[in-house]
Amino acid sequence: MKAYERMLKYVEFDTASDETTGTWPSTKKQLKLAEYLVDELRSLGVENAEMDGSGYVYGTLPANTDKADVPAIGLIAHMDVVGDLGADRIKPQIIKNYGGEVIHLNGIDLDPATDKFLKNRIGHDLITTDGTTLLGGDDKAGIAEIMTALEYMKEHPEFRHGTVQIGFTPDEEIGLSPERFDVEKFGADFGYTLDGENMGGIEYQNFNAVSAKVHIKGLDIHPGSAKDTMINAIEVAREFDEMIPQNERPVDTEGFEGFYHVMEISGIVSECEMSIILRDHDWSKIEEKQEVIKKITAALNEKYGEGTVTTDLRLQYKNMEEMIKPHMHVIDNARKAIRDAGAEPETLPIRGGTDGATLSFRGLPCPNLGTGSFNHHSVSEYADIQDMDTAVQIALNILKEYEENPLR
Ligand SMILES: [Zn+2]
């Protein structure tokens, strides 16, 4: 079976997660797909496949190599999709041999002039939605590719590989999937999430993330008699915002450029709260950004009196690169696997956090690979059937590389 055929089956399951429920997994409907995947894993020779009490699916394909020191490799994808985009009524359609034209769907157009990936899909077969829902290629393309790689290994016992650990997680889209991921039980030495977009993409550099909560204490006095006395916390918040470097906001930055993002200012004359996030791939630069925030705080306290502004800086997450760097074979093998599959490796900065980052800091170095599905979290989502096939080949090539060169 082709990877895209599996994906078309999986998108029939509504697996939208929901951050408001507070349950594990966040929605019961994700378990339906989990159960289906356990059965499928068993049919593909993953005998110990099971779902745990939190809805995570795990399974082991035992090594068939007699070489020692072949590391156990984890392949990970998530089962849920974002809510509010019609996951219960996805109507996929296949466009054969895409010719480069604008694709008209209900209410939206996919236009190669504005979609930087679409113009490179000419001659490929694409799967789009009807334009009113997401597709769910994020991340059912990843699951389909892992399953199809397993099927290949079942049908080709001569293909030598080390232990392969499979993990399908719920609730990735609400940021909770690493929380109950059992890294120890999973037992992989190194892992890959198949959860990226462009096939050939390798992501292992995410932001360092710091949040700054700023509290401003004003001095409220009757405005009629406020001359030289009132401290309007709203005005101080505005001053704070103006002192943050102006050309380092999200709207000014891309690639490996970090930013300051003022997310919220709320308050009244006597009291104001600001919520700011600092992001940078470079640790020294995230430290500089924190210094800037501290200096602004000090300068305003100097001006308005000690205790007017208090700032609480908190580390939210770190760039996983430092956990990957001691094991660069994880990246080098992925690059080679991509080239051997006839594609071009492209290292992409992650302008946010990622599950792989959390897993990496918990002891499972885990970059993210492209799946050949695009425009995640939108009604413009589509998948590329041939690129999905290549993604399967890339996963197999990685396993092959570790089997052929176990000690690096
Ligand atoms: Zn995803």
Image (spheres, helix red, strand yellow):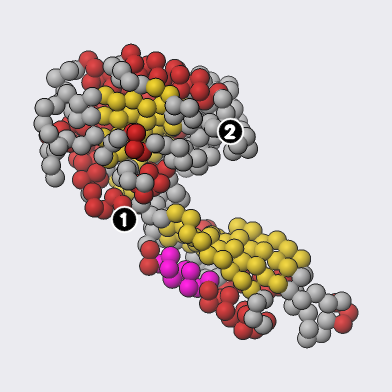
In the image, 146: left or right of 332?
right
Place of residue 278 in the rendered image (x, y in percent of width and height, measured from the top left):
50, 61
| Residue behind mark 2 | 23
Mark 1, other Cα within 10 Å: few <14 / some 14–19 / many ≥20:
some
Q: Is residue 308 above or below residue 121?
A: below
| Residue behind mark 1 | 322
| Residue mark closest to the camera, 1 vs 2 | 2
Residue type at tag 1: Glu
Q: Quadrant of residue 303?
A: bottom right
Residue type at tag 2: Thr
Mark 2, other Cα within 10 Å: few <14 / some 14–19 / many ≥20:
few
> Quick check: is 287 in the magenta stretch?
yes
The secondary element bearing badge 1 is classed as helix
Q: Is mark 2 within 8 Å of ligand 1?
A: no
Place of residue 385 in the rendered image (x, y in percent of width and height, measured from the top left):
36, 25
The residue under the point 26% across, 35% down is 73
First reached walking from the N terminus: tag 1 or tag 2: 2
The residue under the point 37% across, 24% down is 144
The residue under the point 37% across, 16% down is 40
Between the residue at mark 1 and the residue at mark 2, the CA separation in whole angstroms equals: 33 Å
Q: Is mark 1 within 8 Å of ligand 1?
A: no
Query: Magenta stretch: dominant SS?
Result: helix
The residue under the point 60% across, 57% down is 263
Q: Quadrant of residue 398?
A: top left
The quadrant in which the N terminus is found is: top left
The reply to whether discs 1 and 2 touch (Cβ–Cβ < 8 Å) is no
Q: Nearer the viewer, residue 217 or 82?
A: 217
In the rendered structure, which segment of residues is drawn in magenta?
A: 285-293
The quadrant in which the C terminus is found is: top left
Place of residue 47 in the rendered image (x, y in percent of width and height, measured from the top left):
31, 18
In the image, 150: left or right of 39?
left
